[in-house]
């Protein structure tokens, strides 16, 4: 399946960097860090099936390994056959599967709160999953207006980040719109039940895993099993950070991406 992408050409650098969003999100999740990354890379964002501008069919498989194949196919069509990849949440899991699947194509992986690293596979969706999705979907038409109010941003983002009060309106609006429009949200959830990341990645591929110390979506006690990633991976925990570290501490995340990709100054 060809996925919807946006390419941000760099005036000085042609090396491609792919950004993959998480479940219930969209390519817009990366807006705040694209301009800085564009100074070092040609940046490509992708919308997964049923997210952002990519439609979903009734029989679209949503398992991370299959989505990894879909992303590879899409990147090949664009003419990018070797690239660095950054993924958040489900996108982080997909990034890891891509490195395991085709090590010759992946130069490095930066996983921001990657899913799939749980101690035991989930057998059911999170208890609040249906409520979150229903609320976002039902309020989609008025969410741009609601996101101007602190009480509405608190409902939507207090559990996502300890720094939610500092989030700009555009970030909140885009995130709320992405969740409200994500027809692939439930299919993605159901596709990861009874699974976790267990593939092997070659030690030649640099890997950095970054979690926030206040990640309520994938908490350390149950969803951050270090033994599931290669022993050579760097594992960082950012203070005062939740499930989307690129929102909470964009400068630090950009610095770690540059370090992982070998672009650090």
Image (tube, rainbow, N blue to C red):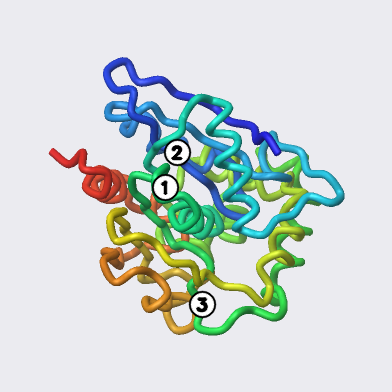
- Report crowding for label 3: few under 14, some 14 to 19, many 20 or more residues within 10 A (C-alpha): many
Q: Residue at x 53, y 55 (%)?
A: 94
* Lateral position of residue 259 relative to residue 76, left or right: left
* Residue 177 can be seen, yes or no: no
CB atoms at circles 1 and 2 under 8 Å apart?
yes
Q: Is residue 163 above or below residue 177?
A: below
Seen as rendered, the residue at the extreme top is: 11
Q: Which residue is mark 2?
A: 18
Q: CA distance from mark 1 to mark 2?
A: 6 Å
* Circle nearer the N terminus (2, 3): 2
Q: Which mark is residue 135?
A: none
* Circle nearer the N terminus (1, 2): 2
User: Residue 171 appears at what percent x and percent y?
Assistant: 51, 42
Q: Residue at x 54, y 25 (%)?
A: 78
Q: Quadrant of the C terminus?
A: top left
* Circle nearer the N terminus (3, 1): 1
Q: CA distance from mark 3 to mark 1?
A: 20 Å
* Secondary structure of residue under mark 2: strand
* Lateral position of residue 162 relative to residue 184, left or right: left
- Report crowding for label 2: few under 14, some 14 to 19, many 20 or more residues within 10 A (C-alpha): many
User: Residue 126 appears at what percent x and percent y?
Assistant: 67, 74
Q: Residue at x 83, y 44 (%)?
A: 57
* Lateral position of residue 70 relative to residue 106, left or right: right
* Secondary structure of residue under mark 1: strand
- Report crowding for label 1: few under 14, some 14 to 19, many 20 or more residues within 10 A (C-alpha): many
Q: Which residue is mark 3?
A: 118
Judge by depth and name the residue closer to the eye, 200 or 111.
200
Q: Which residue is mark 1?
A: 86
* Lateral position of residue 94 relative to residue 204, left or right: right
Residue 85 image-quadrant placement: top left
Q: Residue at x 60, y 48 (%)?
A: 25
Seen as rendered, the residue at the extreme left is: 265
């Amino acid at each position: 399946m060809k996925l919807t992408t946006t390419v941000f050409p760099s005036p000085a650098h042609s090396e491609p960097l792919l950004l993959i969003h998480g479940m219930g999100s969209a390519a817009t999740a990366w807006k705040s860090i694209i301009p800085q990354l564009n100074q070092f890379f040609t940046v490509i964002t992708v919308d997964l099936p049923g997210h952002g501008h990519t439609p979903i069919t009734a029989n679209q498989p949503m398992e991370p390994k299959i989505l990894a194949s879909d992303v590879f196919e899409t990147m090949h069509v664009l003419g990018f056959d070797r690239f660095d990849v950054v993924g958040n949440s489900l996108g982080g899991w997909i990034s890891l599967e891509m490195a395991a699947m085709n090590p010759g194509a992946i130069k490095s992986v930066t996983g921001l709160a990657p899913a799939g690293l749980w101690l035991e596979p989930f057998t059911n969706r999170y208890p609040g999953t249906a409520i979150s999705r229903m609320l976002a979907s039902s309020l989609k038409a008025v969410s741009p207006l609601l996101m101007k109010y602190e009480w509405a941003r608190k409902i939507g983002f207090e559990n996502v980040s300890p720094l939610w009060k500092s989030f700009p309106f555009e970030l909140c609006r885009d995130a709320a719109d992405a969740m409200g429009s994500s027809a692939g949200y439930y299919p993605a959830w159901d596709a990861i039940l009874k699974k976790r990341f267990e593939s092997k990645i070659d030690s030649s591929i640099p890997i950095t895993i970054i979690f926030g110390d206040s990640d309520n979506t994938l908490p350390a006690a149950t969803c951050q099993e270090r033994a599931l990633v290669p022993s050579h991976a760097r594992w960082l925990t950012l203070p005062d950070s939740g499930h989307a570290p690129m929102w909470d501490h964009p400068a630090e995340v950009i610095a770690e991406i540059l370090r992982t990709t070998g672009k650090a100054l």
